[in-house]
Image (tube, helix red, strand yellow):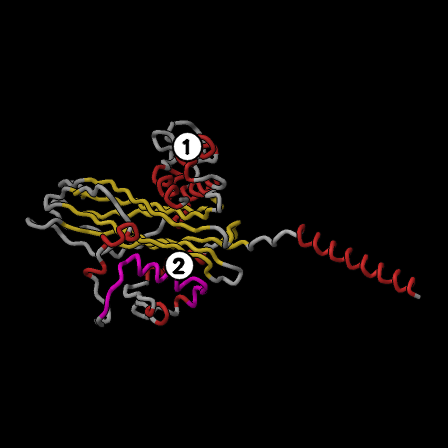
Amino acid sequence: MKKVISIALVLVLALSVFAMVGCGKDKETTPDAPAATLKFGMGVVASYGDATDADGETNGAGEFNATAVAVLLDKDSKIVAIDLDTAQSGAAWTSEGKAVATEEFKTKYELGTDYNMAAYGTKHDGSEGAVKEWFEQADAFMATATGKTLDEVKAMMGADTYATGDLAAAGCTISVGDFVAALEKAVANAADSKATANDKLNLAIVTSASNTDATEEADGSIEFSTTIVAAVVDADAKVVASKTDCVQGAISFDAKGASKTDVAAEIKTKCELGTDYNMAAYGKKHDGSEGKVLEWNEQAAAFDATLVGKTASDFAALAGADTYAVGDLAAAGCTISVGDMIKAAEKAAK
């Protein structure tokens, strides 16, 4: 009887050890479930500010604004990550129609405390209390929007485009109309990507300008070109996904300093224009070689695809000294200057 019990006990112990070893092996070899992939989108809205004529004492002035928002969305269309910024580019000219050059363009976020909203801003409702700097208000918007859907974010904006509810409580005293409009575009064009919640989302803006003085025969102009790149980078600082766009605006004036800009004009980005940008129809390769020229939005897509797998330190090698594409980027079909694209991408991928 004892022998039978002993044999039974040995069998039980053996089975227990086997079960424990089996469980341990399963625990060691079963990989963690891969992080869910997210949708990636970017939206841009642009507009002109009010323009004033020049007189004998004061220069004429105009403004070109571009707000960009990038998002990562989960399967329920909730915002997992968001980044935004605004380029507010000012133009000036004399009463003789001479353009006044701007040497450096910084976004509102890059200006930081130099934007001086805390010093000079006022609450739109006239109530007392500290006004946060612009970048702090942008941070409050992004923090409040994270975890919400587009509709939930829109519900925090009143009919006057100013914040209500949780967003107002977070300290937003500025109009968020352009934030929401750009977010709406970003959500609408969001597409499947390899990005996950473990990756980092950054958006960067670079603006440049070209100036032409007015003559008796032709108006002068200050033309702004604002390039936006949103990049998702992994733990190794390699690009997982990228989106590039550009928006142009021209502020015009005559030889007597009077503004000629239609400040109410609709402005579309180059990607939104698509074939209407007419690069394929009228564009030429900068080196004079024959062959089809891709539309601007197709070239931007080629640029984005070429960035994937690279780090910011790799981007400079994609263009020659003349800012035109070389190597992999040229082979992908880029025939345009990519100088501002690379500058923005380097910022976004850091």
Q: Which of label 1 and label 2 is nearer to you?
A: 1
Q: Which residue is at 92% across, 62% downward?
A: 3
Q: Which residue is at 39% across, 42% downward?
A: 345
Amino acid of disc 2: Leu
The reply, left or right, for residue 26 in relation to residue 188 is right
Instruction: State the quadrant of the N terminus.
Output: bottom right
Residue 153's spot in the image, x, y percent?
40, 66
Instruction: State the quadrant of the C terminus.
Output: top left
The residue beneath circle 1 is 317
Marking on residue 117? none
Q: Is residue 138 covered in magenta?
A: yes
| Secondary-structure class at tag 1 | helix
- Which residue occupies the foreground of this view, 177 or 346? 346
Q: Is residue 180 above or below residue 273?
A: below
Q: Is residue 216 above or below residue 288?
A: below
Q: Which residue is at 32% across, 44% downward?
A: 206
| Secondary-structure class at tag 2 | helix
Residue 8's spot in the image, x, y percent?
87, 62
Residue 325's spot in the image, x, y percent?
41, 33
Q: Report if residue 109 is visible in the image.
A: yes
Where does the magenta region start and end?
A: 129-152
Marking on residue 183? 2
